[in-house]
Image: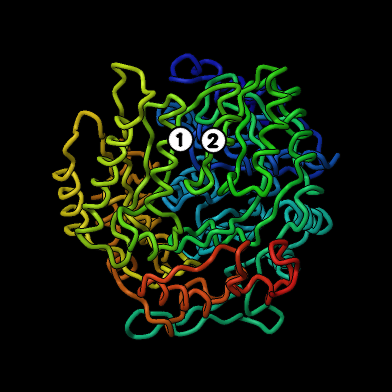
Amino acid sequence: MLNITDKIKPFLLKVKNPSVYIGSEPGSIIKPDADLHFAFCFPDTYEIGMSHLGMKILYGLINSRENYACERVFAPAEDFENIMREQKIPLYGLETKRPLTEFDIIGFTLQYELSFTNILNMLDLAGIPVKSSQRGENFPLIIAGGPCACNPEPITDFIDLFVLGDGEEVTLELLDLFYKMKGTKKSDFLREAVKIQGIYVPGFYEIKYNTDKTIQSVNPKSPEIPKTVTKRIVKNLNSAYYPENFVVPFTEIVHDRAVEEVLRGCIRGCRFCQAGFIYRPYREKSIETITQQVRDLCSNTGYETVSLSSLSTSDYSEIEKLLAELNEYAEGSKTSISLPSMRIDRFSDEILAELMKIKKSGLTFAPEAGTQRLRDVINKNITADEIDRACITAFKAGYSGVKLYFMMGLPTETDDDIRGIAETAEHIIDLFYQNPDRKKGLTPMINVSVSTFVPKPFTPFEFVPQPDEDEIRRRQRLLLSLIRSKKKIKVRYNDYTVSRLEAVLARGDRRLCEVIYTAWINGAKFDSWDNYFKPSVWEKAFEENGVSPEFYANRERSYEEILPWDHLDYLIDKNFLIKENENAKNALTTPNCKEKCSNCGVIKKSGFCPVVGGANE
């Protein structure tokens, strides 16, 4: 058996961050003699992947089974990858240094479309053929889950099986079936696996296309295969598995803190936000559960900062009471409480006071659009007065600046909406100087971050085009020209070519598999990193495979068109998305779920929604 520890030792001091390749961190679980070995692969670097809550949950969950072992695997940085390839060191699990080829199941988490080429690169580093069709019975089963699994079609050539929805229950069901059938043919296992709700095996479906390249039909290849695959839901977060301990890295990571998930889903219905729809229904943990889990995590890891994680933590129904309870613990343990996802309309003196009891951290607000009309189009449901009140509250408390998130290229956006971004930032500068209690000599700083809109599946904007490059760049130049207080307002925006590729992959179909493969063969990897992204490589890959990126990114879809993900059911009714898209065209808002049920489909399809008591109202 290859001794990877001995193989890597001579080279560790030759790479930038050797500690990320050795394992054995506090909290890691080492089970070399388990009966089933699962490799949890994060297709990015250790520093990013170790910040991911989903990995922490599933790592602890699988290892909670006495005879199952879960090990962590990350994409190596280029310096270490070069050494691995030169020295013929295969990609391995951190816990036992077991090569990936010796695992039973390899699971990738799909957090971002631009990590797809890293999946291929990691498989290749492991000595595993990247295409499913080239892997025989001797290779591990390759599975994937996570938010991008809601449209997995662009990578179906490389993955044997996808897990849709919440993973806490379905993962163990899948592993139990695998353990029971261990030694049988992979195809026999897959035919049994599709009987589990939430399991999608793309090889069991046939895709036909029209002459205009749209999809004609998606059909199972045999009668026993379900026509649609429905995602899984964990109904009770209080009883769901949550780890009492995290692996604590030797090195600093992106989010180096304890993380407590306080709720799952979102009530808001922002029309651009995929997560707000695919994670429905909205579910909260109790204050008692949250406080106990925070205590356990801080006690076991030694972390002195706890981040309250969710899509919109300030929507927690008793947020002020929760923060007060946590601060009682935090004050005695010198722990800092972080509330990263703050809704402008939920920001108050009471919340700010609780947050500042331990440690004052930066404030970030997300108006998303510069005018009320466009905020109504995207169903943001916040007003200019609420933006003003949030900033005034922050300035009175001693803050001298805030960070503002906006999007550019939203449906129906005009130059007046771009002008509104600049006017909003300038107005906030004025609000700072209107604060009579401000410290003399203190200068305001407003950081404006502007991302390019990317239409995503399972949102009301899944039908709309992304503006082309020339138009986005024109709007970016317009915004910069409108900023007057250039020393007090800093504007940052992302590269359009990255956003366009994201839009292509987000709404792509199986014809993109060869594009991704070609791009990877020609050097594409770490595509979300500015210093690695190679637009010319992707353009060549599209051209070589006769695929138009504009077809996927810049084309409007009709409501009748069969979309690549229509055979996957995330409980959101397509007619609801159509209605919401029409409301957007007319700048009509939809109330949030706590105000009124909008009949999104969750109740009809699952019979479960805590917000409306499990029944439609």
Say which residue label 1 marks.
393
Q: Report the front residue among 241 and 527.
A: 241
Which quadrant of the view contains residue 227?
Answer: bottom right
Q: Which mark is residue 192?
A: none
Q: Locate residue 300, reporting x and y percent.
A: 75, 23
Q: Locate residue 59, reporting x and y percent.
A: 70, 39
Amino acid on which the number 1 mark rests in the picture:
Thr
Whether residue 548 is visible here, answered yes or no, is no
Q: Quadrant of the N terminus?
A: top right
For marks 1 and 2, give the CA distance. 6 Å
Q: In this figure, what is the number of numbered marks?
A: 2
Q: Residue at x 15, y 48 (%)?
A: 477
Label 1, residues with CA under 10 Å away: few <14, some 14-19, many ≥20: some
Q: Report the front residue among 360 and 47.
A: 360
Q: Report the front residue among 509 and 469.
A: 469
Q: Report the front residue among 354 and 235.
A: 354
Q: Residue furthest left?
A: 481
Which quadrant of the view contains residue 483?
Answer: top left
Q: Residue at x 15, y 54 (%)?
A: 474
Q: Residue at x 36, y 23 (%)?
A: 438
Label 1 element class? helix
Q: Locate residue 465, reporting x and y percent.
A: 31, 68
Up the image or down, 241 lies above or below 268; here it is: above
Up the image or down, 295 lies above or below 351; here it is: above
Circles 1 and 2: CB atoms closer than 8 Å = yes
Q: Quadrant of the C terminus?
A: bottom right
Amino acid on which the number 2 mark rests in the picture:
Asp
Q: Locate residue 590, reporting x and y percent.
A: 50, 68
Say which residue label 2 marks.
349
Up the image or down, 512 lies above or below 448; here it is: below
